[in-house]
Amino acid sequence: MEPVHEGGCVCGAIRYRATGQPALAQACHCTFCQRRTGSAFAPLAAFKEAQVELSGATPSHYDHVSDESGRWVRSHFCGVCGTSVLITLERNPGVRVIPGGTFDDPRWIKLSRHIWARSAHDWIVFPIGVDVREKA
Ligand SMILES: [Zn+2]
Ligand SMILES: [Zn+2]
């Protein structure tokens, strides 16, 4: 049976259900993710559109235009509590990226890659054997 991972925003107005394994799970150290989350980096699980079902309130969204690529990255967030529950990218239209910390149990995620390491905090120690990339 396919694994099902559920999650949602802090206040519970938006819920989601992801079926199957993500195509990729990675930690993003870019400055957009740092500011978006208020944290040092963002664990991100990338699914195909058909794997992710949203329910509850309709998310608000904000388009961040990358100063590297000139393309937008859209953060879909709860209009009540502000949690970023989904990210879509102009570059990958069929992909639904779920911020790892929003899963009810986020511990299943196995990160295979760290990206935008060039903007990582000085105190970050990358695990041995993990793919670390300066950019995306
Ligand atoms: Zn909420
Ligand atoms: Zn990022």
Image (spheres, rainbow, N blue to C red):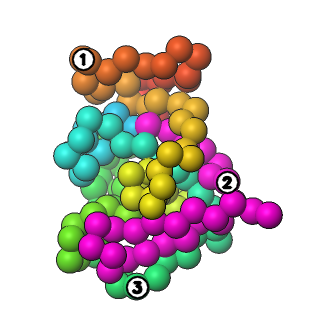
Which quadrant is the N terminus positioned in?
A: bottom right
Which residue: 40% across, 38% down?
A: 28
Magenta-colored span: 1-27
Residue that protrudes farthest toward the right in the picture: 1
Residue 74 % position (x, y): 35, 61
Earlier sequence position, callout 2 versus callout 1: 2
Residue contact at pointers 1 and 3, CB within 8 angstroms: no
Q: Which mark, by number, is residue 61?
A: none
Secondary-structure class at tag 1: loop
Q: Are marks 2 and 3 in contact (CB under 8 Å)?
A: no
- Three-letter residue code for mark 1: Asp
The x and y percentages for residue 119 are 28, 27
The residue labelled by disc 2 is 21
* Local secondary structure at mark 3: strand
> Is the distance from the Cβ of mark 2 to the nearest ligand 2 atom less than 8 Å?
no
Q: Nearer the viewer, residue 13 or 76?
A: 13
Residue 31 in sight? yes
Amino acid type at circle 3 is Gly
Report the front residue among 113 and 64. 113
Q: Dot 1 corresponds to which residue? A: 122
Q: Quadrant of residue 50?
A: bottom right
Q: Is residue 1 left or right of residue 76?
A: right
**Cα distance in 3D space between marks 2 and 1:** 32 Å
According to the picture, the residue beneath numbered tag 3 turns out to be 56
